[in-house]
Image (spheres, grey):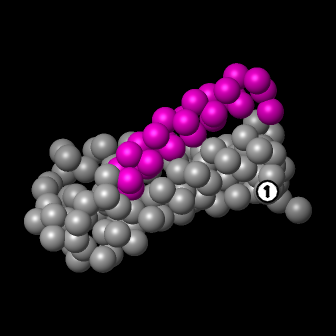
Amino acid sequence: MALTTKWTRVTLWVIQGLLAAVFLFAGGFKLAMPLAALAKVSPLPPLFLKFVSVCEVTGAFGLILPGLLHIREGLTPLAAAGLVIIMIGATISTIAVLGLAPAVLPFVVGTLAAVVAWGRWDALGRGKAH
């Protein structure tokens, strides 16, 4: 069943907007930080964190711009899926370094990104078996 109700579309847009804000803030913050500062706040290599931050910012734009501009709307579920992969890594690394409780936030953000990926994929009619 395609997710085409107005309530579903509005809900997906709200989630996409919140996720875009989260990833723009997190990615932009890490992009603005010098490599030395990044090395102090995370056990991960600073250049890897810069790469992840570029992916987060790009993913944030990918959540919003295709639907807003009605251009290549199939990129939105792909952007959301990419952010899910990032959040899986964030959840695992948070559990490894800080424990289970702090990993709840990246898990929830990743779950919301998965909802957007699935909802937008289904809305495009690509979730059906052919």
Residue 19 screen position, x and y as percent: 48, 42
Q: Is residue 107 visible?
A: no
Q: Residues within 10 Å of mark 1 (few under 14, many from 20)?
A: few
Residue shown at the point (64%, 60%) measured from the top left = 78
Q: Is residue 27 visible?
A: yes
Residue 52 screen position, x and y as percent: 39, 67
- Residue 37, compared with residue 109, is above or below; it is below
- Residue 36, compared with residue 120, is above or below; it is below
Residue shown at the point (70%, 58%) measured from the top left = 75
Let me know if residue 68 is in the magenta part: no
| Residue on which the image places disc 1 | 72
Q: Is residue 35 left or right of residue 8?
A: left
Q: For the magenta stretch, what is the residue range?
A: 4-28
Q: Main secondary structure of the magenta part?
A: helix
Let me know if residue 8 is in the magenta part: yes
- Residue 116, compared with residue 4, is above or below; it is below
Q: Give the amino acid at mark 1.
A: Arg
Q: Quadrant of the N terminus?
A: top right
Residue 9 screen position, x and y as percent: 71, 31
Location of residue 2 by image quarter: top right
Q: Is residue 19 left or right of residue 36?
A: right
Q: Is residue 122 left or right of residue 63?
A: right
Residue 117 screen position, x and y as percent: 62, 51
Residue shown at the point (31%, 58%) measured from the top left = 32
User: In this orientation, which residue lies closer to the viewer: 49 or 94?
Assistant: 49
